[in-house]
Amino acid sequence: MSNSTPEEPSVDIPTDPSTIDSSTDVSGALLDSAPSTVGDDATELISGVLDPELAEDPIENGGAEDPILDVMAVLEAERDGYLLDLQRVTAEFANYRKQADRRTIEIGGRVRGDLVEKLLPVFDACDLALEHSAHDVAPIRASLVQVLQSDGLEVLDPVNEPFDPNRHEAVLHEPADDDDDTGQVVIEVLRRGYAWGGRVLRPAMVRVRG
């Protein structure tokens, strides 16, 4: 078996410009000499390079842009769309977390307030015991109030304060003096009131002057 490689077809192209005839078709010679294995696309490419008139003109083709630029534009549009979706979902999730945290705080405060409301009879019993000179109860009541006040308990004991119908319950009234124009004032607390986190659990039962 012979290992000799086939000789490439040679093309006799004049090197002297003066000897080149205008009728000589160099591109045709090159195309004729191209191997038969070259595909049609390569043949067209060579034709376009050697003969500019055969190349595609972007203006004649309607000003078509580079396909690579078109693909990049599509990818950038998809990227921007995904980024907008991510930003929107992130904002919605942040709002949801804020609402969930606020709802959790409200529910937790209401639950603790309900528990404190169940302890109101204990406070009333301590107050009644103190009225009957059971002073040993005072430290227990003070400790209980101190612990709950740190979490939001408010004791309504409005002596000498203006009467507030939203926080006080007037059960006794006394007329004011003729020269007294201070309005309604609490002069005695018959039963303390309590509030939790700004919400009145029980209004204070008071005696009002004015």
Image (tube, helix red, strand yellow):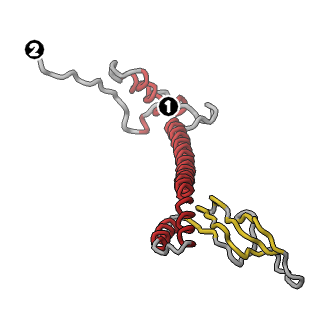
Which residue in the protein does label 2 denote?
Answer: 1
| Nearest to the observer: residue 152 or residue 72 | 152
Residue sitting farthest toward the left: 1
The relative height of residue 131 versus residue 57 in the rendered view (above or below) is: below
Residue 114 at x, y = what percent?
56, 53
Residue 22 at x, y = what percent?
49, 31
Q: Secondary structure at mark 2?
A: loop
Q: Amino acid at mark 1?
A: Asp
Looking at the image, how many numbered discs can be counted on the residues?
2
| Nearest to the observer: residue 173 or residue 24 | 173
Residue 38 appears in the picture as rendered: yes
Q: Residue at x 74, y 68 (%)?
A: 164
The relative height of residue 2 versus residue 54 in the rendered view (above or below) is: above
Residue mark closest to the camera, 1 vs 2: 2
Q: Residue at x 59, y 67 (%)?
A: 154
Q: Amino acid at mark 2?
A: Met
| Nearest to the observer: residue 57 or residue 51 | 57
Q: Secondary structure at mark 1?
A: loop
Residue 209 at x, y = what percent?
79, 75
Image quadrant in which you'd find residue 186: bottom right
The relative height of residue 188 versus residue 35 in the rendered view (above or below) is: below
Which residue in the protein does label 1 denote?
Answer: 51
Q: Quadrant of the N terminus?
A: top left
